[in-house]
Image (tube, grey):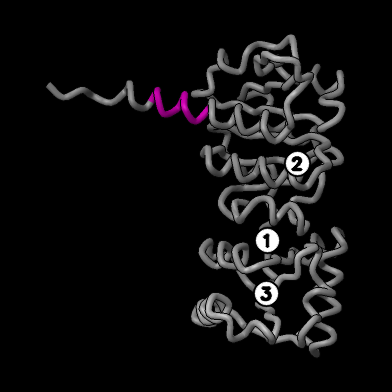
């Protein structure tokens, strides 16, 4: 993997450059919680990097032992080096380089709920949606248009490891519609005027398209979907945060599927 200097320079470039992450299929995880979540998920690691000053901290020592026991190489770096690599403002005692799967949209089964994030620019929102989609049992998350890279450090942190639990795909909106359009119900989210999300039958295969944080979905994108849906609101707020809206829809789908499963079970006498 080269000298320590070369490894550090490559890590810094992986943090900063989307093109390099995708050409190599490698991203950088920052912080012990995210590294531990990746170890639990069985992700393929290149290596773990630890600030030498933290080697004797009990939690970090346990993490590096866990990584070593899984066959992952662990490198100690001089004090202060990780701070120069990491994107996070709070210095992290441990980083990892891991491989991520570059999936095609056609690899996603046409079942359950799929969330399409179109032109979402905020890494925190995207990470939150991936985390909620995982918690609600969604089938996949697709990022289209000018959406942020799901494997950049900020999005990875916001996903809290959920990005390794369900398919996360980057694809054009054209590809997405071409693949799902004939077999699933495509739903465009709008602030007002759509059918209530509570009235949608989410027990069937559905693809829900969430728009840009500031402007929502444009008319041309909405036109390509089967119908529009809205989340009923009271009070004086003009709109919901994209992460909150996507989470509400994902959990509505979960509750409907759970209710349908419960009602189909045979009752004992």
Binning the other alpha carbons within 10 Å of mark 2 as few (below 14), some (14 to 19) or many (20 upward) gives many
Q: Is residue 194 visible?
A: yes
Q: Are the residues tagged 3 and 2 within 8 Å (C-beta)?
A: no
Mark 3 or 2, closer to the camera: 3
Q: Position of residue 216 (x, y in %)?
A: 82, 26
In the image, 150: left or right of 18?
left
Question: Does the magenta portion include 257?
Answer: yes
Q: Position of residue 265 (x, y in %)?
A: 28, 26
Residue beneath disc 1: 100
Image vertical order of residue 116 relative to residue 5, above or below: above
Q: Residue at x 69, y 47 (%)?
A: 127
Q: Earlier in the sequence, mark 3 or mark 2?
A: 3
Query: How many labels sit on residues?
Result: 3
Q: Quadrant of the rendered structure where residue 55 is?
A: bottom right
Q: Quadrant of the rendered structure where residue 242 is?
A: top right
Q: Residue at x 54, y 31 (%)?
A: 251
Q: Residue at x 58, y 33 (%)?
A: 110
In the image, 136: left or right of 159?
left
Residue beneath disc 2: 143
Range shown magenta = 253-260
Magenta stretch, overall SS: helix
Q: Position of residue 238 (x, y in %)?
A: 79, 19
Task: Give the CA separation, mark 3 to mark 2.
Answer: 28 Å
Residue beneath disc 3: 94
Of the pair 172 and 134, the residue shown nearer to us: 134
- Label 3: element kind: strand
Q: Quadrant of the C terminus?
A: top left
Of the pair 174 and 227, the residue shown nearer to us: 227
Q: Quadrant of the N terminus?
A: bottom right
Q: Quadrant of the rendered structure where residue 30 is?
A: bottom right
**Residue extending furthest left?**
269
């Amino acid at each position: 993997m080269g000298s320590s200097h070369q490894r550090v320079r490559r890590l810094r470039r992986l943090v900063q450059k989307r093109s390099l992450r995708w050409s190599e299929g490698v991203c950088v995880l920052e912080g012990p919680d995210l590294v531990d979540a990746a170890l639990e998920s069985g992700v393929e690691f290149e290596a773990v990097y630890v600030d030498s000053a933290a080697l004797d901290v009990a939690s970090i020592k346990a993490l590096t032992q866990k990584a070593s026991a899984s066959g992952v190489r662990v490198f100690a770096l001089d004090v202060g080096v990780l701070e120069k690599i990491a994107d996070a403002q709070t210095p992290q005692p441990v980083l990892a380089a891991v491989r991520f799967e570059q999936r095609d949209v056609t690899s996603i089964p046409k079942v359950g709920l799929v969330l399409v994030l179109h032109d979402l620019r905020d890494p925190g929102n995207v990470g939150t949606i991936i985390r909620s989609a995982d918690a609600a049992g969604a089938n996949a998350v697709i990022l289209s248009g000018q959406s942020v890279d799901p494997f950049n450090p900020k999005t990875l942190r916001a996903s809290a490891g959920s990005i390794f639990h369900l398919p996360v795909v980057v694809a054009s909106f054209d590809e997405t519609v071409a693949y799902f359009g004939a077999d699933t119900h495509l739903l465009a989210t709008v602030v007002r005027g759509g059918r209530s999300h509570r009235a949608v039958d989410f027990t069937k295969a559905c693809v829900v398209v969430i728009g840009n944080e500031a402007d929502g979905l444009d008319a041309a994108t909405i036109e390509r979907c089967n119908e529009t849906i809205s989340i009923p609101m009271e009070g004086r707020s003009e709109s919901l945060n994209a992460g909150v809206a996507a989470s509400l829809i994902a959990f509505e789908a979960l509750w409907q599927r759970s209710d349908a499963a419960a009602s189909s079970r045979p009752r004992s006498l």
